[in-house]
Image: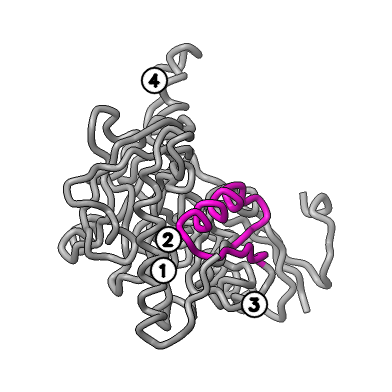
Amino acid sequence: MKVGVVVFPGSNCDRDALHAVRLAGAAGELLWHERTDLHGADALILPGGFAHGDYLRTGAIARFSPIMGAVREHAAHGGLVLGICNGFQVLTEAGMLPGALLRNRSLRFEHGWVTVSVERRDTPFTAAVPAGTRLRLPIAHGEGCFYAPADQLAALEARGGVLLRYTGPEGNPNGSLNDICGVIDDRGRVAGLMPHPERAAESLLGSDDGMFLLRSLVANVAEAMSRAGQDVAVA
Amino acid sequence: MADFRFNVSVMPRAGMLDPQGRAVENALPQLGAASVHDVRVGRRIELSVAEASEEAARALVERLAHDFLANPLIEEWQIELVWRGEGAGRPLEAAR
């Protein structure tokens, strides 16, 4: 079981993500964005950072990186793709997730700890989160204000496409509609989060709540592979 | 083959919150310009296209604007032809 972490020029959370998936029990590999294949990765993470300098709009240029064809195909065949922060922005620009991430309403780069509610626990990205658990996770972004036109927002809510919401004392740091900070696509295979689970991977970092999410991803893929009779290699 | 130069102006969609515009507007009283209002901030992309016809060049720019230069969910755009000339590579300064 191997998780591929896509590295765009300007990604800066790739190694943290790699470390965290290894803590979650998977093998991990960095995949440079110029590749056109996934080198056997069973699941993908698009990490945080500033892909292609975030020029034009966040994620707008990364969407056209050579590897994105393989990323799209992976998801189309039922593979899991998790976008974290800038990775979430890339996935919305690519049309693989609904909505857009706008500049924070405060116009500030917002960073710090947030508390999020887990709206769905029946997804491959959240299945390991214990019932009733709110997650304490860090954020660090300038463009995290989730937006979708009213009709699309209503459709997203109606189909249960919201994965995480800001809650608790810190509230909503960026003006996101409906306090949304995590969404999942309608097939349940592609998810995007503004908070950084990989930065909350060990209690030494202040929280290890992020591991609930990363362990969910790794366990889901490992189970699917063992059901399919494949050998599950664990790092 | 002729060269066509376009300005593509990309703006936040009407009615969308524009935090940059609001920040600029909030600074205006300090400039003694409190009568200025409804400030919005967007961006302009200038580019040249070497194509056989203006129609072909404009169609290409329209596709780029829709797929790349703007995000249709949150932005709208206008395409303006600023000059045309024979042969590619005409220096921009020459057009001014």
Residue A96 numbered tag:
1
| Residue type, label 3 | Thr
Q: Evaluate if marks 3 and 2 touch, with contact meaning CB atoms under 8 Å apart.
A: no
Residue A92 numbered tag:
2
Q: Is residue A69 visible in this depiction of the protein?
A: no
At label 2, counting other C-alpha atoms closer than 10 Å, the crowd grade (few under 14, some 14-19, many 20 or more) is many
Where in the figure is residue A157, as x and y percent of width and height? Answer: 19, 58
Look at the picture and state if A109 lies above or below A235: above
Where in the figure is residue A44, as x and y percent of width and height? Answer: 50, 67
State the separation of the CA atoms marked 2 and 4.
38 Å
State the separation of the CA atoms marked 1 and 3.
18 Å
State the separation of the CA atoms marked 2 and 1.
6 Å
User: In this rendering, would B43 be left or right of B84?
Assistant: left
Look at the picture and state if A206 lies above or below B48: above
Q: Is residue B87 visible in this depiction of the protein?
A: yes
State the separation of the CA atoms marked 3 and 4.
55 Å
At label 1, counting other C-alpha atoms closer than 10 Å, the crowd grade (few under 14, some 14-19, many 20 or more) is many
Q: Mark 4 lies on which chain?
A: B
Look at the picture and state if A187 lies above or below A209: below
Q: Give the range drawn in magenta.
A: A6-33
Please determine if labels 3 and 2 lie on a single subunit. yes
Q: Mark 4 points at which residue?
A: B35
User: In this rendering, would A87 be left or right of A188?
Assistant: right
Q: Mark 3 points at which residue?
A: A36
N-terminal-most mark, 3 or 2 = 3
State the separation of the CA atoms marked 1 and 4.
44 Å
Q: Which chain carries label 1?
A: A
Please determine if labels 1 and 3 lie on a single subunit. yes
